[in-house]
Image: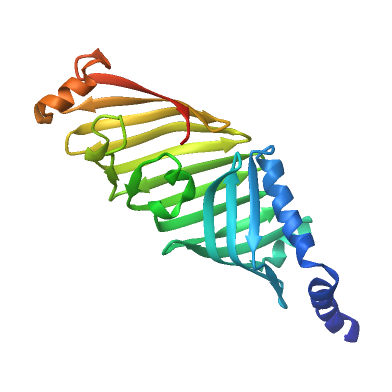
Amino acid sequence: MYIAAGIPVFAILVWFFAIPDNVIQDMIGDSIARAGKGGLSLSMEDFSKGIFFNLHAGSVDLKIDGRPALRITGFSGSLRPRYLAGGRLAFAINGKIGTGDVNGILKLPLEGRIVIDRAELDAIPYIAGFGLDIRGRVSSEITIRGESVHVIFEVPDLNIDDTASVIPLLNTFRRLQGALSVEGNRITVSSINLEGEKGYARLKGTITDGVMDMQLELMPDEDKLNTMESMLIGKYVVSPGYYVIPIKGPVS
């Protein structure tokens, strides 16, 4: 009975005193890097362990191809012992992106599911890299399986200030939803659908090593276009009511 009672105490002492904080950070960071084949990297600030198998960090920063992509603040994780029987470390995690909530489960070797609820788009660094003023609140589900990360998302209150953009009608879209995947240094945009008062659009393509090779398909309500808008999209016409705009070059 004494031995049985001592096992949890011994495990806590090993966790708290025998495993350095940097070892845990390195384990998590290495798992992220392996999953992204070097295209993903993760760092933590103000990292610490709690006595009952908890983790805390003031912020967690994810980079894609060396570019800031995502920052989670107020990060915490708690060990889920049931996965230990299978030889895996697993943590229930939560935190914030802006004022939006993040929660889910992360397992090592890397696997997991993360849910983001109503995070501000302008609090996501990777989006700011496109040089557009994009606002709204995104809800998303992120599935991680080994070397691939799959993301589905929705923004019901999209607002784009495209004064610096050369993409016609971009500021008329009010709703966005879509899916993309990340593997190594390549982001594949399966489909991002946009809806607004002047029609619909679909964005698809890839971003490889920070270089875009995408196209925006426009299906506008031509009766609602002004003269300037009609002129701007005219050179991209493929068939009546259907336009394709190439989007190529480095992320700014």
Give x and y (percent) for residue 57: 62, 67
Residue at the limit of the structure toward the top, as seen here: 239
Q: Is residue 81 above or below residue 185?
A: below
**Residue at x-position 58% and y-position 55%:** 61
Is residue 209 left or right of 48 when viewed as pictured? left
As drawn, 13 above or below 244: below
Is 196 placed above or below 122 here?
Answer: above
> Which residue extends farthest right?
3
Residue 109 seen anywhere in this rendered image of the structure? no
Residue depicted at x 42% and y 39%: 130
**Residue at the spot 20% in from the left edge and 32% down from the top edge:** 199
Left or right: residue 251 compared with residue 215? right
Could you say where residue 148 lies in the image, as x and y percent from the top left? 61, 39
**In the rendering, at what x and y percent does residue 9 appear?**
82, 81
Foreground of the two, 148 or 80: 148
Residue drawn at the location 61% of the way across and 64% of the way down: 92
Task: Using the rendered image of the protein, determine whether residue 223 is visible from the camera's viewpoint.
Answer: yes
User: For this rendering, which residue is in front, 106 or 1?
Assistant: 106
The x and y percentages for residue 107 are: 67, 55
